[in-house]
Image (cartoon, grey):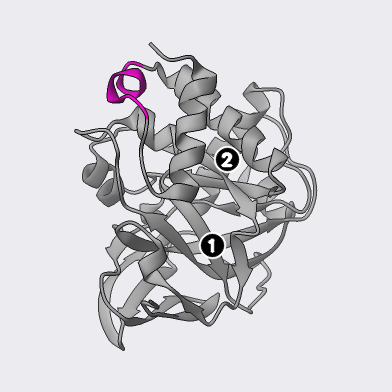
């Protein structure tokens, strides 16, 4: 069986080269803890290559997503610069293997957060602002059938994040009833309230802070957090004008165009 370092090298390679040279057996037989260790090693390689940690994502937070992946618990992964963009007008969906998106509430952390089971008020007081966003995925698994181990190793099949202009104060938001809506070419494709995100985005943020605190880490000021989507993944398989609207937060639009 391969070492964790060599498995991390396989995932690092697959992210950039869009091909898999690893062993299915080695990934499938990882423990959950080992899968997160692989994710850490991949992150270290990406940082060494010049990328920067932008923050964290919490994935598989809604019933629809967990059903889609056959999971019972959420996962976390990292966000990286330069793959976080602000108001990017177009994306070449041909650059991705089975491109898919999720609507996301983007949370900008305004002060260091740590501790167990922080209250909603403590969490909201630590938020600088929130923005609408679109998370981009490669909805592709190299190991079949798909496993949670691969999902964790890959950082939640995350490839990028596009953030809208709006910067809204968290004060006054319910973080329960705000509806997330996804439109393709002006037609509504899917929608759901933010309560589908583990009961609400603050529950997801609390889960992340609990987890990081348990690892002796701090969610640092300036970090971005995307707490998960209330709807299923939306595939992009042709040129599409895509728009995400989040009640009381705003909207973000991106043209997905295949460029040869």
Residue 240's label in the rendered image is: none
Q: Identify the residue under disc 1.
A: 161
**Overall secondary structure of the magenta section:** helix
Rendered-image quadrant of the N terminus: top left
Residue 139 falls left or right of residue 120: left
Q: Distance between the residues labelled 2 and 1?
A: 21 Å
Task: Using residue 224 as the reference point, say whether residue 73 is left or right of it.
Answer: left
Mark 1 surroundings within 10 Å by alpha-carbon count, few (fewer than 14), some (14 through 19), many (20 or more): many
Q: Quick check: is 28 in the magenta stretch?
A: yes
Relative image position of residue 35 (x, y in whole percent):
45, 24
Q: What element carries label 1?
A: strand
Of 125 and 157, which appears nearest the observer?
157
Q: Residue at x 61, y 62 (%)?
A: 84
Does residue 118 appear left or right of residue 99 in this picture?
Answer: right
Image coordinates for residue 170, horizontal then vertical, percent: 65, 64
Please tell me how crowded label 2 is: few (under 14), some (14-19), or many (20+) other residues with Cα within 10 Å.
many
Span of residues in magenta: 22-29
Q: Is residue 144 above or below residue 167?
A: above
| Residue at 52% from the left image edge and 41% from the top image edge | 77
Q: Are marks 2 and 1 in contact (CB under 8 Å)?
A: no
Residue 212: give x, y in percent of width and height: 64, 31
Mark 2 residue element: helix
Q: Quadrant of the C terminus?
A: bottom left
Residue ranking furthest to the top: 1
| Depth order, front residue of 95/66 | 95
**Which of 24 and 222 lies nearest the eye of the viewer?**
24
Q: Residue at x 53, y 62 (%)?
A: 161
């Amino acid at each position: 069986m391969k070492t964790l370092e060599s498995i991390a090298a396989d995932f690092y390679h697959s992210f950039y080269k869009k091909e898999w040279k690893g062993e299915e057996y080695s990934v499938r037989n990882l423990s959950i803890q080992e899968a997160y260790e692989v994710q850490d090693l991949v992150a270290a390689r990406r940082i060494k290559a010049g990328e920067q940690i932008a923050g964290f994502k919490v994935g598989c937070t809604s019933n629809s997503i967990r059903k889609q992946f056959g999971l019972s618990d959420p996962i976390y992964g990292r966000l990286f610069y330069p793959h976080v963009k602000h108001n990017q007008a177009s994306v070449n969906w041909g650059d991705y293997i089975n491109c898919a998106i999720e609507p996301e509430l983007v949370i900008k952390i305004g002060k260091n957060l740590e501790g167990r089971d922080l209250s909603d008020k403590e969490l909201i007081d630590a938020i600088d602002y929130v923005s609408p966003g679109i998370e981009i995925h490669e909805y592709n698994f190299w190991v079949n059938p798909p496993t949670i181990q691969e999902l964790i190793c890959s950082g939640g099949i995350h490839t990028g994040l596009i953030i809208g202009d709006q910067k809204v104060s968290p004060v006054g938001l319910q973080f329960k009833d705000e509806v997330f809506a996804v439109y393709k070419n002006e037609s509504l494709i899917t929608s759901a309230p933010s309560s589908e995100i583990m009961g609400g985005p603050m529950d997801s943020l609390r889960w992340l802070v609990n987890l990081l605190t348990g690892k002796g880490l701090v969610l640092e000021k300036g970090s971005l957090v995307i707490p998960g989507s209330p709807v299923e993944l939306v595939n992009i398989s042709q040129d599409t004008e895509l728009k995400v609207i989040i009640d009381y937060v705003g909207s973000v639009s991106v043209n997905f165009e295949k460029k040869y």
